[in-house]
Amino acid sequence: MTQTLQDLLPQVQQLSSEDRAELASILLRSLEPEEDPEDVAAAWAEELERREEEIRSGKVVAIPHEQVMAELRKLTS
């Protein structure tokens, strides 16, 4: 553990659990490689095409929005 981390640790431990969770999330995201927006868009386009083909082929049956929302309301009430 570096000296900088040793100096920061007592301050971090005094944070609320919510603030520590947010800090942990920020730190974890900082470790992820930055993605090229064009690569992300291409990946989403591929995923949408795959899902559309699954619906067209009958492999997957879509559920109407109204039905999904009604079921969610039942679960949360």
Image: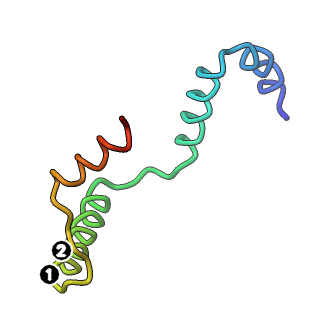
Which is nearer the eye, 25 or 39?
25
Tell me the amino acid under the disc marked 2: Glu
Q: Is residue 65 left or right of residue 41?
A: left
Q: Quadrant of residue 3?
A: top right
Q: Counting other residues with Cα less than 10 Å from the Cα at mark 1, is it few (<14), some (14-19), or many (20 or more)?
A: few
Tell me the amino acid under the disc marked 1: Arg
x 29%, y 53%: residue: 37
Q: Counting other residues with Cα less than 10 Å from the Cα at mark 2, is it few (<14), some (14-19), or many (20 or more)?
A: few
Q: Is residue 36 left or right of residue 19?
A: left
Label 2, on which residue?
52
Label 1, on which residue?
56
Q: Is residue 23 left or right of residue 35?
A: right
Which is nearer the eye, 57 or 44?
57
Looking at the rendered image, the quarter that the N terminus falls into is: top right
- Counting from the top left corner in percent of width and height, residue 55 is at 19, 77
x 25%, y 77%: residue: 60
Q: Is residue 54 above or below residue 27?
A: below
Q: Quadrant of residue 57?
A: bottom left
Looking at the rendered image, the quarter that the C terminus falls into is: top left
